[in-house]
Image: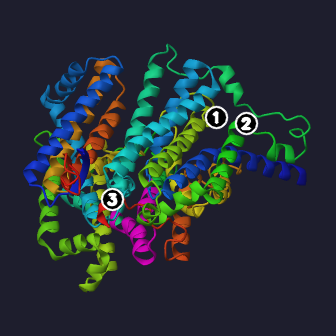
């Protein structure tokens, strides 16, 4: 009895990690973006673009590496649009981000429909070899360990990639000169400018980097979460949860690891609870309700914005000082 | 040495006519870019655009269908514009529509059980609309209260509530409101005829409500004290506080009005178009409305025009989907492109570009 319960818990954590990866990538990407002083509400759209680019590249080239690279580049392209509008043309960040979401969702569903219509069966799937590249790894000696194996060493390589990206982002932001400059821009762009930091260049590069990482999250959804078959509206709100998770994580990629595990767990819990007690719709609602609670709690706790970069959401115009 | 330079300077102001001209120019450029996109995916752009227009204005029925699409969009965009004027980012139009539709549906389906008597149609419809307005206002007050009290991020809060409201409908559909007469896929029953908006000139009365609201909201934001207050709070809360305005109350009131209008749009959609309650009652209207109200520069009359244009876009995209087998998602792409261009064009209303030989220090270096 105790053994089955333990197994069940291990299974839930395993599933939570798998479900948390797109959230982790989206959160990490958005943290980098916000550290440059730009609140990009287009994470959902960037994920859609990444899903479409990654899926289409995997479908046509049969290469998992190209799928990931194309997804990343798709995100870079999408966020260049955002950066051009908000950094150079100083458009409203909220509206620009929302537009990116509308555009990205339309674009991805468009590409998906086109792929589906190009086949006779009206369903598109990636080839078995691309899918196999995202099978759980098998590390000799480790993956077979009784509990630790399932908890730590049996994920697909995308999971490890995401964790590595989050940790590297943490190091980049907190331990490098470039990261320090970036944080300075997010806090006070005018001061950074006076210090000799190339504000515009930093903003562009980091918004693009962040956008690319968000898009990888979308590729994960299309390739792993959806099992390599294109599903209409596949991202369905996960990008938005990622934006909220940034606040939950207090703009720290390390805490984002924890946050995405929790929210990954919330989104899979409905498959593990015995049926009949709670209506399924209520369980699907859970991650969104908890996000609201988190928003409220963090705002009550830190009346003055907490760790949010002080200049986040405000466009910088040098001549306006 | 000659010093060629490109620099930017802020403009004092731009005449409304020129500003409008700039927007039209942005729209034309966006349509050209959209055409390029259509070209790239292997269709002749002009034929597709012409097809869209034919799909909208080809028959009287299709025009009515377009107005039917535009009416709830217009009402939702009006609601959002009220909040946006206060710089309160209500992204929850989608969920507020759902909540309004839920409240209206309760009376549509269960009014016979209340007070026993037979309700005249006008009374039922008025009660449905009021229920939607009240439910929407209360729903909108949840994030607004936390925003006013604790500075909770309203953008994300209202957004999350969209999903919550959508799943409430799913819960009702699968549980308490499941139509017992439907076998298989759970559905909510159709509204009785008395709970459906009557038709005026062939289209449900939603369009009249929308036009009336355009006038009312215009007057509200332009000529009332409350309309002035919300604009000041939006521009600078400290100024508002210094002037003695009750900032928190203004935030709560404005957010409630905004959500109530969106909820009314949900009632119009459910009662006029769908004639039942489904998970798709909002169907992205709440998001499209954000685009509409921003494109219209938050001005109610312009919102009516842009909402109609977006109705054309949506209906046209649906038509070319069936005729040319282009995915209707292309409408989303086109909407995005249009808004990208308009957002970009706004730069030129605020700044001018100076390309000239003289440097900032004059001609001395020559």
In the rendered image, is residue B65 in sight? no
Nearer the observer, B324 or B27: B27
Residue annotated with mark 1: A224
Q: Are marks 2 and 1 in contact (CB under 8 Å)?
A: yes
Q: Which residues are magenta?
A: B136-162
Residue wearing tag 3: B111
Residue B143 included in the magenta stretch of the image: yes
* Image location (x, y in percent) of residue B86: 28, 67
**Coloring scheme used:** rainbow
Indicate the chain on which mark 3 is placed.
B
Disc 2 residue crowd, few under 14, some 14–19, many 20+, Cα 10 Å = some
Q: Is residue A258 left or right of residue B101?
A: right
Between label 1 and label 3, give the one nearer the viewer.
1
**2 and 1 marks on the same chain:** yes
Which circle, 2 or 1, is nearer the viewer? Answer: 2
Residue at x 43%, y 78% (from the top left corner): B149
Chain for numbered disc 2: A
Q: CA distance from mark 2 to mark 3?
A: 55 Å
Q: Is residue B356 visible?
A: yes
Image location (x, y in percent) of residue B154 = 41, 64
Nearer to me, B80 or A70: A70
In the image, B157: left or right of B80?
right
Label for residue A156?
2
Name of the residue lying farthest toward the top = A120
Q: Residues within 10 Å of mark 3 (few under 14, many from 20)?
A: some
Q: Residues within 10 Å of mark 1 (few under 14, many from 20)?
A: some
Q: Are marks 2 and 3 on the same chain?
A: no
């Amino acid at each position: 009895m105790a053994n089955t319960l333990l197994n069940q818990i291990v299974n839930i954590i395993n599933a939570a990690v798998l479900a948390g990866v797109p959230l982790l990538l989206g959160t990490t990407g958005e943290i980098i973006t916000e550290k440059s002083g730009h609140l990009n509400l287009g994470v959902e759209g960037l994920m859609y673009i990444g899903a479409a680019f990654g899926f289409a590249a995997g479908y046509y080239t049969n290469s998992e590496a190209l799928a990931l690279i194309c997804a990343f580049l798709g995100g870079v392209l999408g966020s260049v649009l955002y950066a051009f509008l908000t950094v150079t043309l100083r458009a409203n960040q909220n509206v620009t981000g929302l537009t990116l979401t509308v555009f990205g969702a339309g674009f991805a569903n468009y590409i998906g429909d086109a792929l589906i219509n190009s086949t006779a069966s009206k369903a598109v799937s990636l080839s078995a070899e691309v899918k196999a590249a995202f099978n759980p790894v098998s590390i000799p000696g480790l993956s077979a360990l009784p509990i630790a194996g399932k908890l730590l060493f049996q994920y697909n390589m995308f999971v490890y990639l995401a964790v590595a990206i989050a940790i590297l982002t943490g190091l980049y932001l907190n331990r490098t000169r470039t990261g320090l400059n970036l944080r300075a821009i997010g806090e006070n762009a005018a001061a950074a400018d006076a210090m000799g930091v190339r504000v515009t260049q930093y903003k562009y590069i980091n918004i693009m980097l962040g956008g690319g990482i968000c898009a990888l999250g979308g590729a994960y959804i299309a390739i792993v979460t959806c099992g390599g078959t294109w599903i209409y509206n596949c991202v369905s709100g996960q990008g938005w949860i990622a934006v909220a998770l940034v606040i939950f994580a207090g703009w720290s990629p390390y805490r984002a690891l924890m946050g995405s595990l929790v929210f990954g767990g919330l989104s899979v819990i409905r498959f593990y609870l015995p049926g009949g007690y709670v209506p399924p719709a209520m369980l699907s609602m859970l991650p969104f309700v908890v996000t609201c609670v988190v928003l409220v709690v963090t705002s009550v706790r830190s009346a003055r914005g907490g760790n949010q970069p002080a200049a986040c959401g405000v466009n910088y115009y040098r001549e306006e000082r | 040495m000659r010093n060629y330079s490109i620099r930017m300077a802020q403009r004092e102001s731009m005449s409304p006519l020129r500003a409008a001209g700039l927007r039209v120019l942005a729209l034309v450029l966006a349509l050209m870019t959209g055409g390029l996109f259509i070209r790239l995916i292997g269709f002749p752009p002009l034929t597709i655009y012409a097809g869209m227009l034919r799909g909208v204005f080809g028959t009287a029925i299709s025009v009515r269908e377009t107005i039917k699409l535009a009416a709830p969009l217009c009402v939702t965009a009006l609601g959002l514009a009220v909040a946006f004027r206060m710089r309160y980012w209500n992204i929850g139009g989608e969920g507020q529509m759902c909540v309004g539709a839920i409240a209206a549906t309760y009376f549509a389906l269960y009014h016979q059980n209340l007070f026993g008597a037979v309700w005249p149609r006008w009374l039922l419809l008025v009660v449905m609309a009021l229920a939607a307005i009240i439910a929407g206002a209360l729903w909108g007050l949840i994030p607004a209260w936390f925003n006013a009290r604790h500075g909770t991020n309203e953008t994300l809060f209202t957004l999350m509530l969209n999903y919550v409201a959508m799943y409430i409908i799913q819960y009702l559909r699968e549980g308490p409101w499941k139509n017992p007469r439907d076998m298989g896929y759970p559905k909510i029953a159709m509204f009785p005829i008395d709970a459906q908006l009557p038709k005026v000139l062939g289209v449900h009365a939603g369009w009249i409500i929308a036009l009336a609201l355009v006038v009312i909201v215009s007057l509200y934001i332009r000529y009332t004290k409350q309309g002035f207050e919300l604009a000041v709070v939006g521009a600078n809360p400290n100024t508002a506080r210094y002037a003695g305005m009750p900032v928190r109350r203004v935030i709560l009131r404005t957010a409630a009005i905004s959500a109530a209008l969106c909820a009314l749009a949900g009632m119009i959609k459910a009662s006029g178009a769908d004639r039942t309650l489904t998970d798709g009652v909002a169907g992205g209207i709440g998001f499209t409305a954000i685009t509409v109200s921003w494109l219209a520069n938050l001005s109610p009359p312009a919102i009516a025009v842009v909402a109609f244009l977006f109705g054309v876009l949506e209906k046209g995209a649906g038509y070319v989907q069936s005729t040319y087998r282009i995915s209707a998602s292309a409408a989303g792409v086109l909407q995005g492109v249009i808004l990208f261009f308009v957002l970009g064009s706004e730069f030129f209303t605020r700044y001018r570009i100076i390309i000239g030989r003289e440097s900032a220090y004059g001609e001395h270096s020559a």
